[in-house]
Image (cartoon, rainbow, N blue to C red):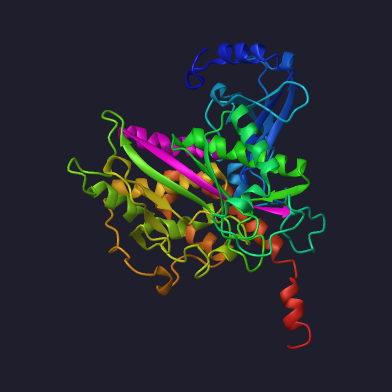
Amino acid sequence: MTDKKSMNFNDLEQWLNERRVTEVECLVPDLTGVARGKILPRGKFTEDRGMRLPQSVVAMGVTGEFPESGPYYDVIDPTDKDMQLRPDPSTVRIVPWATDPTAQVIHDCFDNHGNLVPFAPRSVLRRVCDLFAAEGLQPIVAPELEFYLTARNTDPNTLLRPPIGRSGRAETSRQAYSIDAVNEFDPLFEEIYDYSDKMELNVDTLIHEIGAGQMEINFFHAEPLGLADEVFLFKRTVRESALRHDMYATFMAKPIAGEPGSAMHVHQSILNKDTGKNIFSNPDGTPSEAFMHYIGGLQRYIPAAMVLVAPYVNSYRRLSRNTAAPINIEWGYDNRTVGIRSPISSPAARRVENRVIGADANPYVALAMTLACGYLGLKNKIKPKAEMRGDAYLSPYALPRSLGEALDWLRRESDLHEVLGKEFITVYSEIKELEFEEFMKVISPWEREHLLLHV
């Protein structure tokens, strides 16, 4: 059988036929990372079908709303024109929980002239990877994705609680790295691993994180687009599996007050495409100038790019002192208090870990963001600050503290607009502005508790 990476549509049809697929889920990741699209009978899934969806499908907020006017419509046609969807054969996978043989295929979005739609998340990541390719470079990434398991919660006004495990009890204390705590949910995790295996997902280790009911899955390192696809599909898989075991899985950045937030740490290195060597190390094994420039780019641009990886009002609750989440963009070797960490490794595996990204980030946008910042560091030869050798929590905040502030910082950073695409920045910013305005209409319990009778 043809390797998936080189599959064409004929190979894709053979793959579907060999597995006697009866339905095909045609998926498109939107700005929030939600799977949009259509489900087709196998006989209707043909190369010349020309499946279409409105432009706005990939450019809506988490509430499903759209701006009524403004710069959004300088990019999105007011008549809401169609996009042409084309399947990427390399993304085809079985849907393991479906009753009948069902496949899922991720699609790219094109306009009527055959150009990639610039504000679709997959297009943005392709754009950044192409910039590296033009320099003869290949980014390699490895995400670590945290999430919480919670008891079912059908009332948004009710606090989330840890789920009941095999023992019949819920966690009431933090169980970092506890094997027994993971074993409490063995049936669920056995199913997740089984589903991941059937979907050929690149998952590595599972650990229990610090929070009550908080878990982490690590992915093997690979090329960015394929791994973004896998994170996108994995989130869907975990949520589905949790529901089948009478619980929820959430990738909210800060779902439970008093517990640590959930991150998507991204390890990244850059290879020379001709030699296959890691450009972060010199021939003698010492850190290279490219390594330092990459860190310099992350330090220079991450603060302005924060809204791309902390996309909701809830995201900024995670970024607080002494909660296993960074508050600034200091860097250091084997230092988990900084925003940019370089783990202990061999020269060939030298890498940078971006610890700022939240688990709630769209994986395509998150990888595009961190690679864009590093790319600008390489191109502009930006020198980093001195290594942070102590506790970075003792240093000042250097990241935006709210969604509104983060939006302002992104709008002012034209270098990121050039790398990620002005159309994408416009659409993304307008959607986030709309979400922020919606949130500001809500009165929180804190306000009622402390302000109602005291001010």
| Horizontal arrangement in the rendering, residue 284 relative to residue 448 (left or right) | left
Could you say which is closer to the camera, residue 446 or residue 52? Answer: 446
Q: Is residue 354 above or below residue 403?
A: above
Which quadrant would residue 12 be assigned to in this image?
top right
- Residue at horizontal 72%, vertical 75%? 446
Q: Is residue 221 above or below residue 68?
A: above
Q: Position of residue 412 (x, y in %)?
A: 46, 59
Residue 147 visible (yes or no): no
- Residue at horizontal 69%, vertical 28%? 96
Q: Is residue 149 magenta?
A: yes
Number of numbered callouts drawn: 0
| Horizontal arrangement in the rendering, residue 261 relative to residue 150 (left or right) | left
Q: Position of residue 368 (x, y in %)?
A: 47, 44
Q: Position of residue 63 (x, y in %)?
A: 72, 51
Could you say which is closer to the camera, residue 235 or residue 45? Answer: 235
Which quadrant would residue 350 be assigned to in this image?
top left
Q: Is residue 206 above or below residue 39?
A: below
Q: Is residue 370 above or below residue 128?
A: below
Could you say which is closer to the camera, residue 137 or residue 127? Answer: 137
Q: Position of residue 220 (x, y in %)?
A: 47, 38
- Residue at horizontal 77%, vertical 22%? 100
Span of residues in magenta: 121-150
Residue 351 visible (yes or no): yes
Quadrant for the C terminus, please.
Answer: bottom right
Given the current orientation, which residue lies at the most extreme right position? Answer: 155
Given the current orientation, which residue lies at the most extreme left position? Answer: 284
Q: Is residue 188 magenta?
A: no
- Residue at horizontal 56%, vertical 55%? 209
